[in-house]
Amino acid sequence: MLAFIGRSFIQKIVTLFFVSVISFLIIHLAPGEPSQIDPMNPKFTPEMVERFRAAFHLDEPLYVQYLYFYKDLFTGKTFSWKDNRPVLGKIWERFLNSLSLFIVGTILTWTLSFPIGIRSAINRGHAFDRSTTFLAYLLISIPGFFFAYLLIISVVSYFHVPVIGMVTFGLEGSSAIRSVMDRVWHLFIPSVLGATGGVAVLSRYVRSQMLEVEGQDYVRTAKAKGLPNDQVYYKHALRNALLPFVTMFGMILPGLIGGSVIIESIFAWPGMGRMAYEAILARDYPVILTVNFFSAVLVLAGTFISDLLYTVVDPRIKL
Amino acid sequence: MTIKKILIIAPTLVIIFLLQSYLWVPTYEEQTRGNPKRLTKFITASIGDASMLNPILSADTASSSIESLVFEGLVDRDENLHFRGRLAISWEIHEEAFFYVNEKAAVPGLGEASSADIKALLTKAINQPGLYDITLQTTLKNIKEIAVLPSRSWTTQQPYQAAPQKGQTEKVEVTVDAPAGIKLMLQQVDQDLFENLSKLLGENYFSSFSSDAYLSFGKEISDEQKHTLGRKLLSSTEHNPIVTFHLRPDVKFHDGHILDAGDVKFTYESIINPKNLSPRISDYEPVKRVEVIDDLTVRVTYKRLYSPALGTWAMGILPEHLLNKTALEAEAEKRGKDPAEFSLRQSLFNRNPLGSGPFVFKEWKSDQYIALDRFEGYWEGAPNYEHYMFRIIPDLLTQEIEFYAGTIDNYGVQPHQVERLSQDPTYQHFSGPSFGYSYIGYNIRREPFNDVRVRRALGMAIDVDKIIKYVLYEQGERITGPFVKQTDYYDHNIKPIPYDPEGALALLNAAGWQRNQAGWLEKDGKKLQFTLITNNGNPLRKDILAIAQDAWKKIGIDVRTDLLEWSVFIQERVDKGDFDALILGWSMGIEPDLYQIWHSSQTNPYQLNFVGFKNKEADDLIIRIRKEYNHDKQVAYSHRLHEIIAREQPYTFLYVAKWTAILDKRIVIKQQNDEGQDVFEAIKPTKTGSYNFYFNRWIKLSKAPYFALDG
């Protein structure tokens, strides 16, 4: 076990190094200049372009820039070129905003998918199964932005309440509970939107896992010895069907830093996705690279956790 | 079964909890009509957040719109785009001109003349102006005072190119023994001063001045380098325009500190400080020095004639007492940074700005909103709105929804939405020409665009009126030249190129292009074929690309088109001059300075005259406009330049788009008349196309007023 942890740790460090090199190269080799340098502005003289490039170390060879960047990152000195704020502070602020959306979305996804999936599996081929299948495919195929507009327009025109932003604008000075509930409401619609795709996909997984397990000998045995249906399904079948989901739990970790550009833009949510997207448009390299680095770390940590969880839930697997 | 129960109860509880939050949320009705305080707030929406709220550091639109409310400059433009004083009550512009006495030159009637001789000659001429031609007379009348500057010498260390191929620079010690000089005080700036004086002092008096002769070098350098250094250290003539500003007394910053001349000087110094990386530095590069005469007087001396200078003082003035060296060092200390490296760019001031404008900064939540309160102590009287909110809503459709709901007062309304909303009685809508234009530019270095007939024919084949009607929903106007349409510099007598495909074909025939059997135009066996490119992501340009391609195909030109990602488009094609024809737009300032875009010296790679337009008369006019301080003369030069560019057609000038705005009808202008009563007026855009010129006087009423003038 310890050997596995050590080995995989070293592997992950090596991978991380390559990820950092490749992402650095891709971002720097892509055409475009930081938005502070505006070649189409008549007031921007070549001397100014040089001065900006020198201030951002853009005039140095790439490997020197690479070292500069990672030195700054590990000493916590990276600054966004756009507004000169520390990148880590910026990311932390956005991370907290995205986190609540992520948590509510994940709770919705995971609590809804299981009952729906299990029920479709039990009633395979019946009305419930067919209608959830239909709905799942509908939700998977509908474009997120379109669905978002439909949701916003219907909520706004039928319920006359605001949905965008993190809080109702101009609500300052109302009671604590009201502000909390207001935040919850503002979380609700975007996380429903974020969860729809997840629920649709995950419930399909649950269904097929349940169906697979249902065909196993031990389930037949359980049925044959006359156990009540509920006990067969929820005790014997479900436990074994859960195995692959435990590992999936590790995979949602990178979602922490991803955020969703589309949902965050439409709902005016000041989250990670929007920040990263705007940083890419403005060629704000320190922000892009830092976000990139952290998501690489989270992906690697996620796979590591998945591996570990597997050994915990399935004693047959030895590392 | 507990598991079953949990699986059903858990999601139900979660959903019930989330749904019940609906009951706590205030409806739109409660937020808007049910909330009397809403009328005291103006809320606007922007798709992007500000970057730094410091007028000398940021150049983006979002930041500028906040800065213009929090900070204020010395001058700005009034309804007619003339300068008006803000922090400055008034200003004077005069000139000090300077030249070295050319001891070797033969002055008519005097021979080799000393400084005293020259002074006497000039004084005599000023007293008898009738003897000379009219231009010299004007120049002489303009001279207020003549002074002799004695000869002097000094030693400096100067960098020079040691090995020109390698680009190495070294330093050399230079001793300058400057001859005596003459200083002329002029009432007005006169760019022709030396040209006219040479009629008096001899044609080559100024040009034959050899500065190298007065220099001695610490070590041997090439003659060419001596010459370069000579011109740099000892220029034979110099124009020093001077602007003296008289500041408004008792103007306060938001913290109560009095704004004085020191703050103006400090703002200038912050801009030119290379550590601050100000994007505005090129505006202030021609400044020689800024002097504080007294608390309320600032004198700005320029190195050379630079007529856009006055406009640069619209820059917001920074509070020196919060940002000077001691303040920055204290901040660095407090935040644990290295004071040596800490500059204005790192200061928290950029997120908590403090100026002297009509609104006080209150709060900034990144990517959510920026909140301002009105400044009760504003010198012109506090604005009517108590609060100003700048909400960041990145999606245009959501902006529109919020606007209908009444939670924002203003948003980036699109032309097609204006058309839809213009019928709605709840809203008032405005539009006006913006500062900029769209064009098709031709690479004049290449066949067939080196022929003006071809360029003209290409313009004639495109129906621009239809583009304006169908692509822009009528929110655009035709434009014929490179100046901002609502300024005097733009010559309205120049007619746009007519839409005339037949005429275009005739012109092309005259240029030697004939239709072949397949219907394509051909000359010497070569088909008329080129590629029209533009950047991806701009739907308007994409539409024009298709329209132009189709229009040109109809007269037999084989046009290929290409859409490129913006940075590839700029770096690989525009900067390198590697294109046939392209669609682009310029956004412009009011100043008629066209040097970077149209002067023939700017046609190299990475410069902005990428179409390669070269015209001697135009070059001359561009320089004259830059140096001319007299508005009427500037207008005359600009009209001539406009005419040349319209004739040469290096661009097919397409249109100037209109800005569009929609407001609730309840927003009006509130003023007090002489008896102290409130008078209401409808908002009208000014002649020059700004609807929010009187923003400080706006207010929202609870009911839409009825104005007799509405009919």
Image (cartoon, coloured by chain):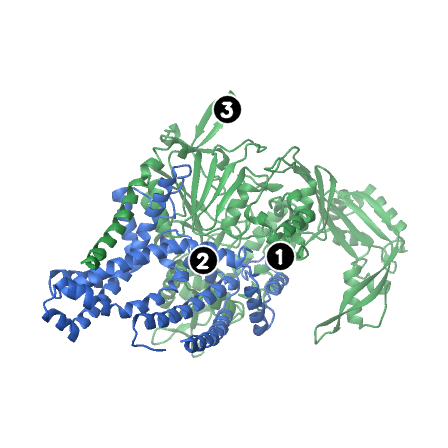
Chain colours: A blue, B green
Mark identifier at residue B287:
none
Judge left or right: residue A137 versus residue B475: left
Mark identifier at residue B673:
3
Name the residue carrying label 2: A275
1 and 2 marks on the same chain: no
Letter of the chain that mark 2 sits on in the rendering:
A
**Can residue B627 be seen here?**
yes
Q: Secondary structure at mark 2?
A: helix
Q: Secondary structure at mark 3?
A: loop
Query: Residue B389 in the image: x percent, y percent?
Result: 45, 41
Query: Residue B469 in the image: x percent, y percent?
Result: 36, 52
Other residues around mark 1 within 10 Å, as few (<14) / some (14–19) / many (≥20): many
Dot 1 or dot 3, earlier in sequence: 1
Letter of the chain that mark 3 sits on in the rendering:
B
Q: CA distance from mark 3 to mark 2?
A: 49 Å
Q: Nearer the viewer, mark 1 or mark 3?
A: 1
3 and 2 marks on the same chain: no
Amino acid type, callout 2: Met
Other residues around mark 2 within 10 Å, as few (<14) / some (14–19) / many (≥20): many
Judge left or right: residue B74 versus residue B199: left
Q: Nearer the viewer, mark 3 or mark 2?
A: 2
Name the residue carrying label 1: B277
Query: Residue B154 in the image: x percent, y percent?
Result: 86, 58
